[in-house]
Amino acid sequence: MTDKLPKTFEQKLARIDAIVKELEGGTVELQRATELFKEGKVLARDCETLLKSAQEQIDEAMAEPQHGAGDARAIAAPELDHELPF
């Protein structure tokens, strides 16, 4: 693996892209290809976890307010319906 592990989703995705390009180059030795494959699998798993977490946050934000009429989201939401271009 690389010395500096990618931290953000975007960095992980960029590293996966670099791994794919290196493997597709066709000149990678078997040992190196195996190491790259393992690194890519770990990064892909991490990205999947991050995407699931982001989806859960989006789902929660889009959910109906459960705190009653005093919730600020309940007041602002109807106004947004009229402003959306689609």
Image (spheres, helix red, strand yellow):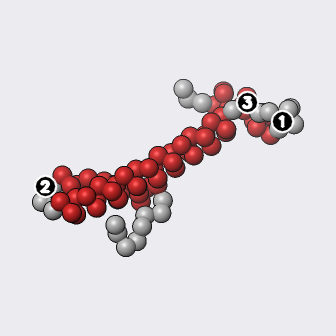
- Say what amino acid the circle numbered 2 marks: Gly
Label 1: which secondary element: loop
- The 10 Å Cα crowd at callout 1, few under 14, some 14 to 19, many 20 or more, is few
Which residue is labeled 1 in the image?
Answer: 67
Front position among marks 1 and 2: 2
N-terminal label among 2 and 3: 2
Q: CA distance from mark 2 to mark 3?
A: 51 Å
Report x, y in % for residue 65: 77, 33
Residue 64 got which mark? 3
- Residue occupied by mark 2: 26
The front one of 65 and 86 is 65
Q: Going 48% across and 59% down the picture, which residue do you hit?
A: 8
Determine if residue 41 is in view.
Answer: yes
Q: Secondary structure at mark 2?
A: loop
Which residue is at a point 34% across and 69% down the rendered structure image?
2
Contact check, label 1 and label 2, Cβ < 8 Å? no
